[in-house]
Amino acid sequence: MAYRRSIIAGASEDRLGRLIEARLAPGADKENIDARIWDLFGEEWCVMFTDLSGFSRGVAKFGIIHFLQTIYESERILIPVIEDHDGILLKVEGDSFLVIFRNVRKALQAAVYMQRVLKTYNADRIEEEKVLLCVGLGFGKMLRIGDTDVFGAEVNAASKLGEDTAKAWEILVTEAVKEAAGKLPDLAFEEIDEIPPGAGRAYRTLYSID
């Protein structure tokens, strides 16, 4: 299965690379090439970026073994939650996950459940061993390249919200996520001032941690 996935990703990357090369050629019909790229790779997804609060400071203070332990525990705890909510984990880079969901509501539910699971996990742990999660969500049309990566304005916005703006326990979303989710029981949204490039507005998800 892993071998098959690598072929699919490689074929997509190869096709995209050839189209980008064609786009760079003198006199290229960029509008037509762009349309072909979107026809091939354009899909609608909800994208999630996660980050661990205070992670870099923890590594500097407690060392590389602490780094590895925290990464291991975050994967062990959170990946099953992602799978249970029909998310697809595309990347793990350091302390960050890149995940895509077809269903915006499931993405929000996954984010909330991840925070709840971590509250239970953290309850009896010393401060430096706690796993503190930040989440950013975006939704819309994006370019999905096999099972390796996604690109688009909402991807960039979700990345900024999850990795730079959100604090521990926060789930920040773009306006597109809020609109697509509609009304959900036990969830509300509060507009924030920090609007990432690519999003019209951004919101903090209000949820019960219990």
Image: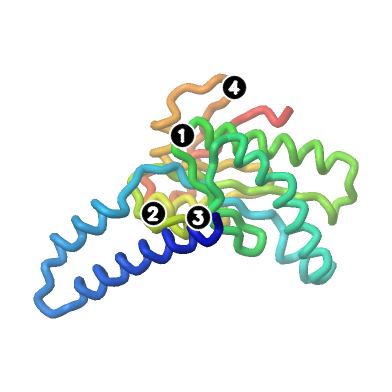
Question: Mark 3 vs mark 2: which is more N-terminal?
Answer: 2
Q: State which mark lies toward you, 3 or 2.
A: 2
Q: Tell me the SS state at disc 1.
A: loop
Q: On residue 38, which mark appears?
A: none
Amino acid at dot 3 = Ser
Amino acid at dot 2 = Arg
Residue holding disc 4: 186
Residue holding disc 1: 103
For label 3, count other residues whose C-alpha is less than 10 Å away and answer few (under 14), some (14-19) or many (20+): many
| 99 relative position to 127: left or right | left
Residue holding disc 3: 159
Kindly report the distance in space between the C-alpha atoms of the residues bearing marks 3 and 2.
15 Å
Q: Tell me the SS state at disc 3.
A: helix
User: Measuring 82% from the left and 43% from the top, which residue is drawn there?
Assistant: 122
Question: Mark 4 vs mark 3: which is more N-terminal?
Answer: 3
Front-lying residue, 42 or 3: 3
For label 2, count other residues whose C-alpha is less than 10 Å away and answer few (under 14), some (14-19) or many (20+): many
Question: Mark 1 vs mark 4: which is more N-terminal?
Answer: 1
User: Measuring 45% from the left and 59% from the top, which residue is drawn there?
Assistant: 149
Residue holding disc 2: 144
Amino acid at dot 1 = Asn
| Quadrant showing the C terminus | top right
| 102 relative position to 206: left or right | left
Residue 72 x/y as whole percent = 76, 57
Up-down: is 38 above or below 63?
Answer: above
Up-down: is 49 above or below 46?
Answer: below
Question: Mark 3 vs mark 1: which is more N-terminal?
Answer: 1
Question: Mark 2 vs mark 4: which is more N-terminal?
Answer: 2
Amino acid at dot 4 = Asp
Residue 166 appears in the rendering: yes
